[in-house]
Image (cartoon, rainbow, N blue to C red):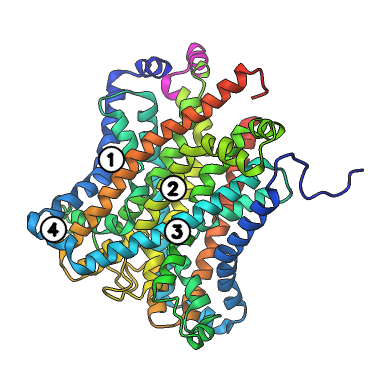
């Protein structure tokens, strides 16, 4: 029987100073402030909180935030997979440049993305001009919110799928081919199942990012009550009115919903992996 | 090249069709917004552009952004090294919990990140009355902006360094210690040179996010012109005043920063890859366990 030991022996020095410094910093910067939101909720007037989060305006913002994030994440899952596929499998001029520009949504400040997208998609803008001729309006509608979320979420799926497609063993495909499978059949039954956990992971990250996104959305959404207000915007509005309890209530529901969603997606993807192993 | 071999198996029409769709999607959603920033910035000509970025309020916003980012990057860098050292080189209980907690700020909406600091330091917050009594202000002032920036960029350096330090093992450090080097000397002479590119990569990602952060900073700043405006907040104010040319001029500085970040990222990714493979090769050559 070995005695309980927190840390395994090592000849390297410096564990305790590094460990205590980093956990102290983590506690002060992240854990203590974050606990404020839950302590506030626990000590608040629950009837008031319920009134806030069940008010029609807040419910409409939750619906928009979840709906637009979901649609954007689905679009990103499809097109992100396609982009990753093209980048891994084919070669074309300018491929390296295209590959490095995928990360632009990570690097470009969200407010800059927000005003740029708005300028393009308003009715007189580069793209908006064309679309409005067919009666499609993007800026200041839920479609605009979705467009902004597609922009911010794109790199998640591409970067999750790329390494998996690159590592997929081509011998398996050759084998499927020589056993008489068509290319489409091979893709559907062999290649895609291998990449599916990565697609799902990228989808989940894009979805979670979309739920919390603020900067790129507030400009293109127009922030019309009941129509194009996202949940983070309502938190900001409540704070501007010094309604801390209301802001906290909206935030707690968002936090819980996104944790719950990540749990479900983790469970789904581990089930998916288990199925693949069998 | 296997990539080419597999590519040849798909008929040209499929290959070019898919490539065109992918490129069209990227052009519409990524390249066009970037082009729009510069087109709008120079819409009214150079003199308007220069006037917008040399305006005293713009310069103040640039100074505040650089200061807050510098503090955030330095403190998160020191944290990242300490965290990567204890997580990457040692085995201890609760390690995976610690790794998860480090990633936590990524999972939280920037607006909520700002909110938590208002709840702690705001006038009705935990320390609100204490701060007022001592004539100090965190929210709607520079310290709040720094705290919010530190929070949202918290995981960047640690995330880069942990896998890098883990992959390199401890044999070299153990050899250094056995030959009589001190702990610090071992770290400075052996570990640090081994992780320098990964470190720089983390610092670049961290500073790009720090300078561009909008949601969290917007909540804690109070938007006091000429005082608590960072560059993204200054862009927002100009834009909401329909001063589009000026808004996009300041935005173009941030876009240039993003492009520099992307270029540095491509270069450093390649460097980190060689850092890891060189290490694996040396280990193999030495007959080590790799």
Letter of the chain that mark 4 sits on in the rendering: B
Pick the front one: B209 or A22? A22
Give residue A57's position: percent from left, percent from top.
39, 75
Q: CA distance from mark 4 to mark 3?
A: 29 Å
Residue highlighted by disc 4: B50
SS label for mark 2: helix
The residues colored magenta run A173-185
> Of the residues under marks 4 and 1, which one precedes in the sequence?
1
Expressed as whole percent of the image width and height from the top left, the position of residue B69 reads: 39, 58
At 61% across and 81% down in the image, what residue appears?
Answer: A43
Which is nearer the eye, A157 or A140? A157
- Mark 4 is surrounded, within 10 Å at the Cα level, by few (under 14), some (14 to 19) or many (20 or more) other residues, namely some
Which mark is first along the chain, 3 or 4? 4
Residue B127 vertical placement versus A169 (above, below): below
Rendered view: A57 above or below B260 = below
Q: Chain of mark 3?
A: B
- Vertical comparison of B71 with B22: above or below: below
Looking at the rendered structure, the secondary structure element under dot 1 is: helix
Q: State the mark number for residue B72.
A: 3
Q: Which residue is mark 1?
A: B25
Q: Is residue A229 magenta?
A: no
Disc 3 on helix, strand or loop? helix
Which quadrant, please, contains the N terminus of chain B?
A: top left
* Co-location on one chain, circles 3 and 1: yes
Task: Give the residue at x 37% y 45%.
Answer: A154
Q: Main secondary structure of the magenta part?
A: helix
Q: Which residue is mark 2?
A: B203
Q: Is residue A182 magenta?
A: yes
Q: Position of residue B13 (x, y in %)?
A: 27, 22
Who comes first in sequence, dot 2 or dot 4? 4
Q: Secondary structure at mark 4?
A: helix
């Amino acid at each position: 029987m070995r005695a309980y030991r927190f840390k395994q022996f090592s000849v390297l020095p410096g564990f305790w100073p590094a460990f205590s410094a980093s956990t102290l910093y983590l506690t002060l910067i992240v854990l203590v402030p974050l606990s404020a939101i839950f302590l506030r909720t626990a000590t608040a007037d629950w009837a008031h909180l319920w009134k806030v989060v069940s008010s029609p305006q807040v419910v409409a913002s939750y619906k928009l935030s979840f709906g637009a994030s979901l649609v954007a994440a689905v679009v990103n899952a499809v097109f992100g997979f396609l982009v990753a596929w093209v980048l891994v499998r084919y070669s074309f001029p300018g491929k390296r440049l295209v590959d490095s520009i995928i990360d632009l949504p990570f690097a470009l400040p969200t407010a800059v993305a927000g005003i740029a997208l708005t300028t393009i998609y308003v009715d007189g803008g580069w793209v908006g001009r064309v679309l409005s001729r067919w009666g499609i309006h993007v800026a200041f509608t839920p479609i605009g919110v979705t467009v902004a979320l597609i922009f911010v979420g794109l790199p998640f799926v591409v970067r999750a799928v790329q390494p998996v497609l690159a590592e997929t063993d081509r011998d398996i495909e050759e084998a499927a081919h020589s056993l008489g499978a068509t290319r489409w059949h091979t893709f559907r039954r062999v290649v895609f199942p291998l990449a599916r956990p990565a697609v799902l992971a990228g989808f989940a990250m894009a979805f979670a990012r979309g739920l919390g996104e603020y900067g790129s959305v507030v400009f293109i959404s127009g922030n019309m009550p009941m129509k194009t207000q996202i949940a983070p915007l309502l938190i900001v509005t409540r704070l501007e009115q010094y309604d801390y309890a209301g802001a906290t209530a909206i935030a707690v529901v968002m936090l819980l919903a996104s944790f719950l969603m990540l749990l479900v997606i983790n469970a789904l993807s581990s089930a998916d992996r288990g199925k693949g192993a069998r | 090249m296997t990539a080419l071999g597999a590519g040849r198996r798909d008929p040209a029409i499929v290959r070019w069709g898919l490539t065109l769709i992918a490129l069209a999607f990227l052009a519409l959603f990524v390249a066009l917004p970037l082009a729009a920033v510069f087109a709008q910035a120079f819409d009214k000509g150079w003199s308007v552009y220069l006037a917008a970025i040399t305006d005293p309020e713009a310069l103040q916003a640039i100074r505040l952004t650089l200061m807050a980012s510098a503090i955030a990057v330095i403190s998160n860098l020191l944290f990242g090294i300490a965290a990567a050292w204890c997580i990457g080189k040692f085995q201890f209980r609760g390690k995976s919990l610690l790794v998860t907690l480090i990633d936590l700020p990524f999972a939280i909406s920037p607006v909520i990140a700002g909110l938590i600091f208002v709840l702690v330091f705001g006038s009705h917050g935990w320390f609100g009355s204490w701060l007022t009594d001592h004539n100090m202000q965190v929210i709607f002032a520079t310290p709040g902006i720094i705290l919010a920036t530190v929070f949202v960029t918290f995981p960047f350096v640690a995330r880069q360094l942990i896998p890098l330090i883990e992959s390199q093992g401890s044999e070299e450090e153990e050899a250094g210690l056995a030959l009589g080097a001190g702990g610090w000397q071992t770290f400075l002479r052996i570990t640090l040179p081994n992780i320098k590119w990964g470190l720089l990569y983390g610092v670049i990602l961290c500073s790009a996010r720090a300078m561009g952060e909008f949601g969290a900073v917007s909540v804690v700043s109070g938007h006091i012109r000429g005082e608590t405006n960072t560059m993204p907040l200054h862009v927002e104010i100009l834009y909401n005043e329909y001063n589009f040319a000026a808004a996009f001029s300041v935005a173009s500085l941030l876009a240039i920063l993003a492009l520099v970040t992307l270029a540095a990222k491509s270069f450093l990714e390649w460097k980190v890859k060689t850092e890891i493979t060189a290490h694996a090769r040396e280990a193999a050559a030495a007959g080590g366990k790799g």
